[in-house]
Amino acid sequence: MESYRGFLKEFVGFDENGLMNIHQACAVAGLGGKEMRSGDYDYYINEMIRANDAKVVGPFIMAALEFEKAGLQP
């Protein structure tokens, strides 16, 4: 419960139109390839971040649904 609340507080906000946004998501998380992405700390800490990346929105929706199904309030 505390992790969910912390995530909401730290990463979720609303824009001027009242639309929810999830901020500070890693834009890329692949490994290997032509660029030989190593997956080490420097790789992840220096990757581009953006709002509402699918890698964060999908899991967030699933977590929110589980909290709702369990009758929990954030």
Image: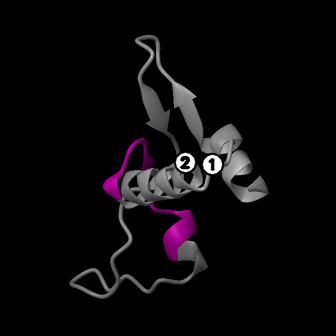
Is 16 positioned to the left or the right of 54 in the image? Answer: right
The amino acid type of the residue labelled 1 equals Gly
State the residue in front, 41 or 16.
Answer: 16
Mark 2 and mark 1 residues within 8 Å of each other at the beta carbon? yes
| Front position in the image: 44 or 74 | 74
| Outermost right residue | 2
| 67 to the left or right of 35 | right
User: Which quadrant is home to the C terminus?
Assistant: top right
Q: Residue at x 35, y 83 (%)?
A: 31
Task: Indicate yes or no whether the magenta region holds residue 33.
Answer: no
Residue at disc 1, secondary structure: loop
Q: CA distance from mark 2 to mark 1?
A: 5 Å
Q: Position of residue 41 (x, y in %)?
A: 60, 77
Q: Is residue 48 visible?
A: no
Identify the residue at the far top of this view: 16
Q: Magenta region: which residues?
A: 43-54
Q: Which residue is mark 1?
A: 71
Query: Label 2 is placed on what type of residue?
Result: Glu
Q: Name which quarter of the figure residue 3 lies in.
A: bottom right
Q: Quadrant of residue 59?
A: bottom left
The residue nearer to you, when weighing 20 against 39, is 20
**Position of 42 compared to 7: left or right?**
left
Q: How many marks?
A: 2
**Picture disc at residue 68:** 2
Tell me if residue 17 comes above or below residue 38 in the rendering.
above
Where residue 35 sits, quadrant-wise, is bottom left
Res. 14 visible in picture: yes
